[in-house]
Amino acid sequence: MSDKNSIRLFKNTGMLYIRMFLIMLVNLYMSRVVLNILGVEDFGIYNIVGGVVVLFSFINSALSAATQRFLSFALGQQDLEKLKRTFSMSLTTHISISLVVLLFAETIGLWFLNAKLNIPAERIIAANWVYQFSILTLIIQIIQVPYNASIIAYEKMSFYAYVGFIEAGLKLAIIFLLNFGGFDKLIYYASLISIVAFLTFLVYNIYCTKKFDSCKYYFFWDLNLYKSLLSFSGWSLFGSLANVGSNQGVNILLNLFYGVTVNAAMGIANQVNAALNNFVINFQTAFRPQIVKSYAQKDRDYLMQLIFQTSKFSFFLLYIIALPILLNTEDILQIWLVNVPKYSVEFCQLILIFSLIETISGPLWMSVQATGKIKNYQIIIGSIILSNLFFGYIFLLLGYNPIIIFWIKIIVNLFTLFARVLFLKKMIQLSIKLFLKKVVLRILFVVTISLPLPFLLLYFTSGIWGIFFVTFISLLAVSISIYFVGILSTEQVLIKNFLWKIIRN
């Protein structure tokens, strides 16, 4: 990795971390306040109704992946004209897709909400209002994707961070506004979320239009480009649907078998997981354009280096903050929330374990997308992921505790990781031996060395000071383990040089 690329990646990652940290604090605070204001039942309704809408977002996810891949690929080839065509065609496609999503959401989705979901009769009208505002938010986010993809492709992470600050401020305003007015607070909350989404879209639109020549939209029709976009997106649809089904489908299963109270616990677990997982998402977002561009430039050595480093560091970044939470989950939730829904502790712990495994896979599927050859990959990986729903339904039908859902997700995720490595071995000649040596073994070494001492301290500490002490020892143990056994000597030098540059500046 060149010094120039290294500095840019570290700078981008730093800006994304600042963005993430602020958003994480706001989201965690919002979860506490919103749960308290809405109550467990309405909070559960918001999560399950929002989950129905997310089922339609798999189309958006597929198109987002296609747009980012093609924009980054064109930038890697330094083809400005191709970049302009790709942006305009992708925006046209997203607008048309938003209309299709609206059609299905207002027919099949609306029927499913009113006929199948387990929602108290006195709150069904409010649930329908929430559903409509959630659809509006989703459509705004679909049309916004080409603008987000352009910012990421151009690696303008500073602006991406600034928009995050604005969004966080608007969400804090929502909390303030919820305390005023004689409206139904559940409906009021959903409407305010839609307004925030629209204002965020306007900021992205104005910036991209003024900053990048490629983002000046004009309507044209290029059948070959359209086929390329749709072909890539089409095979991404199944994989995106599988991921959404694995997450939101499980939420619906829990609702059908256990009602909205368990959905509230799922909502808390998802909030905690999303807040912490943003560390990794932002880190991988900084690396994603480089992965695609290195493939476009046929720089295989750099590509392999990016895959190994991103997989390993992604796990470390989540592990260093997840371990203290895994060890102190119950105490943290008691302090954070006024009322802790049943199963929240177990859901939070298991979903973090799931995410720790998932972090390793990020650069693997990014590399597959860089090749553009995703047909067989999406069919097989998507099928494995969707098996979560099948096994989850069977075990819930047999009367198992809802916690079983997360154990199934963890086991399936391990199989998915193994399958992804096998695919990359065939597609880009990824060395399984080197992946095990440079990624998996170093992760296992770090976990084995860092876990025993903090875990042992749990039996000798208690209360809020016990949380701080265990957290401090966890951070220290993980940091030392990562530095001495988790990373290579060249990576140690890179980190020291970057930190020294920050200190000097």
Image (cartoon, rainbow, N blue to C red):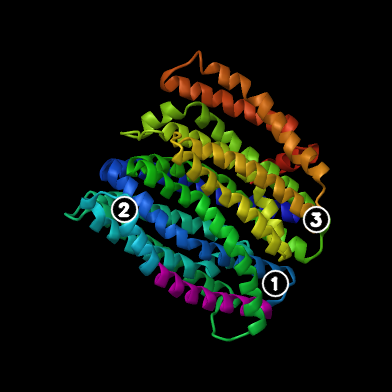
Name the residue carrying label 2: 174
Name the residue carrying label 3: 426
Answer few, some or many: residues within 10 Å of disc 3's Cα (few below 14, many 20 plus, some between 14 and 19).
few
Q: Is residue 11 above or below residue 484?
A: below
Image spot of residue 369 (x, y percent): 68, 61
The quadrant in which residue 359 appears is top right
* Residue at x 72% of width, y 39% of height: 496
Q: Amino acid at mark 2?
A: Ile
Mark 3 falls on what kind of element?
Answer: helix
Image spot of residue 247 (x, y percent): 50, 49
Q: Is residue 100 magenta?
A: yes
- Left or right of 303 on screen, residue 102: left
- Left or right of 313 on screen, residue 336: left
Magenta residues span 81-105
The quadrant in which residue 64 appears is bottom right
Q: Residue furthest top?
A: 460
Q: Is residue 139 above or below residue 399?
A: below
| Marks 1, 3: nearer the viewer | 3
Q: Is residue 281 magenta?
A: no
Name the residue carrying label 1: 74
Image spot of residue 45 (x, y percent): 32, 49
Image spot of residue 360 (x, y percent): 66, 44
Number of marks in the rendered image: 3
| Res. 1 in view | no
- Considering depth in this image, is 345 or 90 the residue closer to the camera? 345
